Amino acid sequence: MYFVNNDALAFLGESVQNIMYTFINKRKGFVKMSNLRYFTAGESHGKALVGFMEGIPSGLSISSADIDTDLKRRQGGYGRGGRMKIEADHAEIISGVRWGKTIGSPITLIIENRDFKNWEKGMSSLAAFEGSIPAVTKPRPGHADLSGAIKYQHHDIRNILERSSARETAMRVALGAIARKFLFEFNIKIGSYVIQIGKEKIQNSKIKNQTSAGKLLEMFDLAEKSSVRCPDKTASEKMMALIDKAIKNGNSLGGIFEVFITGLPVGLGSYIQWDRKLDARLARSIMSIQAIKAVEIGDGFEMGRRFGSEVMDEIFYRKEQRGKLAGAGFYRKTNHAGGIEGGMSNGMPVILRAAMKPIPTQRKPLNSIDIITKKPVEAAYERSDICAVPAAAVIAEAMAALTVADAFLEKFGGDSINETKRNYESYINYTSDF
Ligand SMILES: Cc1cc2nc3c(=O)[nH]c(=O)nc-3n(C[C@H](O)[C@H](O)[C@H](O)COP(=O)(O)O)c2cc1C
């Protein structure tokens, strides 16, 4: 009897184990096995930033120059600090690309920190250099400084600020440039523009409710020419004047930008599980950028202030559109949803908006407490940006590219670009006949 029971238990245990095994291995969302995996490493004044990405199919043309274009865009913007003048970022491709094309193996990138030459001892990995620069002990409000020091048991805040700094986002932009190049193979384009800095904003009528990819790309082109990434000339000038005022007063500014994605087929993401929803994935990835404090999709918060009839995108049909768009002849005249319904792309441009808080470090330092003496002090000051909203918008483009590329690979798979294309085209043919 004893043996029977034990066997039965063993059998039951094995079955449960098998079920868990199947669940963990086959249900990707359950263990967060994304299709595109990436990490960044590196400290702000360390030797270099390193990025690692796996999941880009073989056969994609990519070069350092493709990546450096986006790195340059991230470094721009009116109101940046001195650091941006020191660093002319360049991504070196270490692995995963041969003779100009991805080979399917993990891609590694390195971006050297040119400023490292001034920090060789201070940021050295060698114990011999311990104490070669003074410890940072005055936590800056609005930064990871104090909570990070307590959490990781550090009495030198440099150990926190070196990694929490937005310098890390240079590598995200570099990895995002590869994702962007991949998406471009499918005519998916990603752009951004700034709509507000401090209280200065672009007129609402110019940006609201975009249904047209062409119009969004037009605004993007205009934004690329503006020092504050704003497509409206008058608003740009007012934003720059406000930044000048902040510089003069030793203050800082935040703002709001929009990111758009055009050319997405219907059905990226899914309603069937919380962590597969495209809107949730985008919100998470954009929110992960330093100083981003809010993300809206489509009309976002405005939806909460309207009647239902005002904010749903009614569905229309035009037979002659069949075959042209993924989603057959179905179309919308409005885009309040920002291109996502039920956690899936609906064929309209995806539009999201994010708010960045003002830069926490200020020339007129804020009150703080020294973590060693516990005495009131002025917060530490290190050369700092005054306003970095245009750069944050470029970083958000990269995060959107990485997120959408992941969802795209989840839907279409493929170990080579050719295979992904075959899968994609077959789906597009199917949807245009739906
Ligand atoms: C592109 C970019 C540049 C930034 N530059 C600075 C800076 O020069 N000085 C600073 O204090 N904060 C800067 N920040 C903001 C801080 O990194 C951020 O506020 C801080 O890490 C705390 O994170 P949290 O605001 O998400 O809580 C920048 C953020 C971004 C996205």
Image (tube, rainbow, N blue to C red):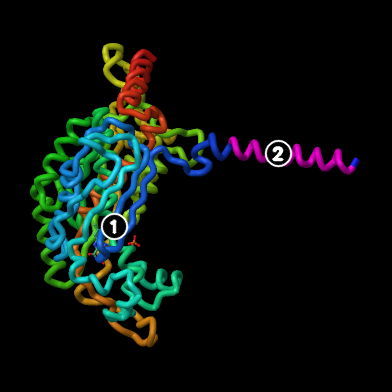
Q: As displayed, is residue 392 above or below residue 55?
A: below
Give the quadrant of ligand 1.
bottom left
Q: Quadrant of the N terminus?
A: top right
Q: Is residue 13 above or below residue 266?
A: below
Does any portion of residue 377 appear in the rendered image?
yes
Taking depth in this image into account, of 106 and 293 the one nearest to the observer is 106
Q: Amino acid at mark 1?
A: Glu
Q: Amino acid at mark 2?
A: Glu
Closer mark to the observer between disc 2 and disc 1: 2
Magenta residues? 2-22
Residue at the spot 48% in from the left edge and 43% down from the top edge: 32
Mark 2 lies on a secondary structure that is helix
Around disc 1, counting alpha carbons within 10 Å, would you say few (fewer than 14), some (14 to 19), or many (20 or more)? Answer: many
Q: Magenta region, mostly helix, strand or loop?
A: helix
Coordinates of residue 144 in the picture (x, y in percent): 36, 67
Say above or below: 264 vs 24.
Answer: above
Q: Image quarter for residue 238?
A: bottom left
Q: Which residue is mark 1?
A: 168
Residue positioned 29% across, 20% down in the render? 325
* Percent coordinates x, y for residue 72 in the rendering: 15, 50
Which element is circle 1 on?
Answer: helix
Q: Is residue 38 magenta?
A: no
Residue 334 vs residue 69: left or right? right
Q: Name the residue beneath numbered marker 2.
A: 14
